[in-house]
Amino acid sequence: MKDSTTPTTRSEHLFARAQQVIPGGVNSPVRAFKAVGGTPRFIARAQGAYLWDADGNRLLDYVGSWGPMILGHNHPAVVEAIRAALEEGLSYGAPTEREVVLAEKVLQAYPGCDQIRFVSSGTEATMSALRLARGYTGRDLIVKFRGNYHGHADSLLVQAGSGLLTGSGGTARSAPSSAGVPEAFAELTLVADYNDPEGLKALFAQQGEQIAAVIFEPVVGNAGVIVPTNEFLEALHRLTQEYGALLIADEVMTGFRLAPGGAVELLGLKPDLVCWGKIIGGGLPVGAYGGRAEIMQQVAPLGPVYQAGTLSGNPVAMAAGIATLDTLLTQPPYAHLERYGQALQEGLAGIFRQAGIPTTINRVGSMITVFFREGPVSTYAQAVASDTQRFKQFFHGLLQNGVYWPPSQFEAAFFSAAHTQTELERTLEVVEQVVREL
Ligand code: KE4
């Protein structure tokens, strides 16, 4: 798939070198291009809507670091805030004013949450929220949905076996989706199907009294974009309420992206706990979880649920998060992102229709996925039926023409406040050209 005109020598050399010292040459699997093949581009710098790879190729970025870069790369307000913070030191292991400032800003956007605890990644946020839910309810079981990803905590690396309980009775035996997760852990995670209210109802009818929490992506990004149905959202709230389980909205990807108050605001959700990551760190390592005071007061040092972190609330990361949220509040990009998203979605749909290539494009705000398949994609089963071979050709065609789409059919593409009409036209021009060769 290598295009002779695009120099990628440095990326190839760096990848070979990286693989000697880092498993797969990457620090997160999706970066290795396993789903699409070829050599991952090593990135040297970024600015606005663009990345430059190690060979100097400019790439129009639709990954955005998988979500954090909603303002575009290197936004001056964020860079300036980090620079100023550096003057005061890097990390103290002690409380600082900045943590309080960022906590107040996040809670202002999420009126259903009274308190928040900062950690250093989305994984830590969801892992801690689950432990808190188990501690608060005294129950052991959790429910997640197939195709939802909540980071790599053991309890969340679980997929259901064929016996998934889908309203037909029987019990779901969950199997780990990673080596190293003991069966004993996996059995404490029940896996249901997203947008299947009946299946969830049956699961609760069977085991509801032992369920501590249900965790879900309020808009799925990790199967590609899948939008929740109202019936599903209603069932999530009603069943958790009815059985005394906590509802955990994983807003690591959607928080502050889909609206100032994330999916909770956009969809009018009432979760018991919320998890954040990505945007609230502005590109530096920040995660968080929060909820009502009566639940959060179970967290150490106040309560018996232990959670800690050397770099939690890191002052430099807090400065990046504060500057990002301040910019989002003072110069809200959401109307622009919606206009850009609409034009991109319509433009893409027109090109594929014209070419007679079946696609379904799912989008919410600035999260978008082109599924290479016919018909709606509102379930994980529909998403995985996509033509990944065709996606691979699409991906490489774009990449060779300087457009960097996420290297997997089952990821969301993101765009930012820095994506303007110029980027829109360039994107559609390249897609038109690439689709002709598909
Ligand atoms: P991190 O531990 O990667 O910061 O966050 C985990 C996480 C939790 N919840 C949701 C909804 C998420 O999307 C994520 C992480 N998203 C992936 C992208 N699909 C991060 C990219 C990667 O794994 O490298």
Image (cartoon, rainbow, N blue to C red):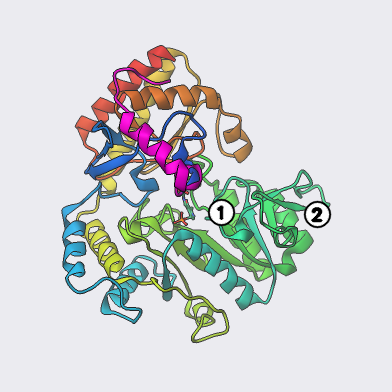
Name the quadrant containing residue 108. Answer: bottom left
Alpha carbons under labels 2 and 1: distance apart? 23 Å
Query: Among all residues in the image, which is located at the extreme bottom?
Result: 302
Q: Secondary structure at mark 1?
A: helix
Q: Mark 1 highlights which residue?
A: 233
Return the x and y of residue 182 as percentages of the image width and height.
71, 59
Q: Which residues are magenta?
A: 1-27
| Residue 134 appears left or right of 325 | right
| N-term mark: 2 or 1 | 2
Return the x and y of residue 73 as percentages of the image width and height.
25, 47
Residue name at image x 64 percent, y 68 percent: 245
| Residue 332 appears left or right of 210 | left
Alpha-carbon neighbours of circle 2 within 10 Å: few (<14), some, or many (≥20)? some
Which image quarter is the C terminus in? top left
| Residue 96 appears left or right of 182 | left
What amino acid is found at the position of numbered circle 2 in the picture?
Thr
Which image quarter is the N terminus in? top left
Q: Which mark is residue 411?
A: none
Residue name at image x 28 percent, y 37 percent: 54
Name the quadrant containing residue 404. Answer: top left
> Which tag is nearer the camera, tag 2 or tag 1?
2
Can residue 242 be seen here? The reply is: yes
What amino acid is found at the position of numbered circle 1 in the picture?
Leu
- Answer whether residue 204 is magenta in the image: no
Alpha-carbon neighbours of circle 1 within 10 Å: few (<14), some, or many (≥20)? some
Can residue 270 be seen here? The reply is: no
Q: Secondary structure at mark 2?
A: loop
Residue name at image x 83 percent, y 52 percent: 170
| Residue 274 appears left or right of 110 | right
Q: Mark 2 highlights which residue?
A: 171
For residue 49, above or below residue 126: above
